[in-house]
Image (tube, rainbow, N blue to C red):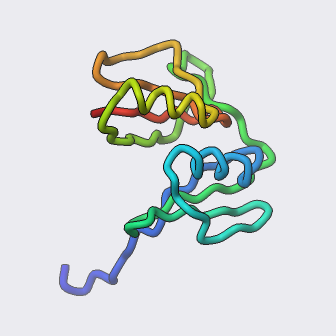
Amino acid sequence: MADRPRLTLTSTVLDAPDARSLAAFYERLLGWSREEDEPDWVVLRAPDGGAGLAFQTEPAYVRPVWPAGTGDPQMMAHLDIRVDDLEAASAHAVAAGASVADFQPQDDVRVHLDPAGHPFCLFV
């Protein structure tokens, strides 16, 4: 496909009832800084570059259910975050404002929920 235009993934966007509030959680969790900061749109970037994580206020946001049952609002995506120490990273996530999901499908992964209910996985 020599004629394919150049495409660059710049960020993954998470909807939330309050973009700034959810961005603040991920700032604490990841240690990333704000590249853009508007009332309804925030972009975080890792210090070493790469695709960012963006947050968009969505007034009609519905918190997903994990794990979802029939008729429940389903997650559209989730974040996988590699860590050095699963227990320490899980404690850090909780201190930053996450909760540990009741359902844990694997022993070597910890599913957490961010303050807006998006699941994310910590793994070694």
- Residue 84, compared with residue 11, is above or below; it is above
Quadrant for residue 81, please give it.
top left
Where residue 8 appears, as percent x and y from the top left, is: 38, 74
Of the 4 image quadrants, the one containing the C terminus is top left
Quadrant for residue 46, please give it.
bottom left
User: Is 48 left or right of 99, judged from the image as shown?
Assistant: left
- Residue extending farthest top: 102
- Residue extending farthest bottom: 3
User: Is 44 left or right of 59, judged from the image as shown?
Assistant: left
- Residue 41, compared with residue 92, is above or below; it is below
Where residue 95 appears, as percent x and y from the top left, is: 59, 31
Q: Residue at 76%, 48% (x, y): give it.
A: 18
User: Is 2 left or right of 34, judged from the image as shown?
Assistant: left
Foreground: 67 or 114?
114
- Residue extending farthest front: 88
Q: Residue at 42%, 33% (x, y): give it.
A: 89
Where residue 108 appears, as percent x and y from the top left, is: 28, 22
Q: Residue at 34%, 25% (x, y): give it.
A: 109
Of the 4 image quadrants, the one containing the N terminus is bottom left
Q: Residue at 56%, 17% (x, y): give it.
A: 70
Where residue 5 appears, as percent x and y from the top left, is: 33, 83
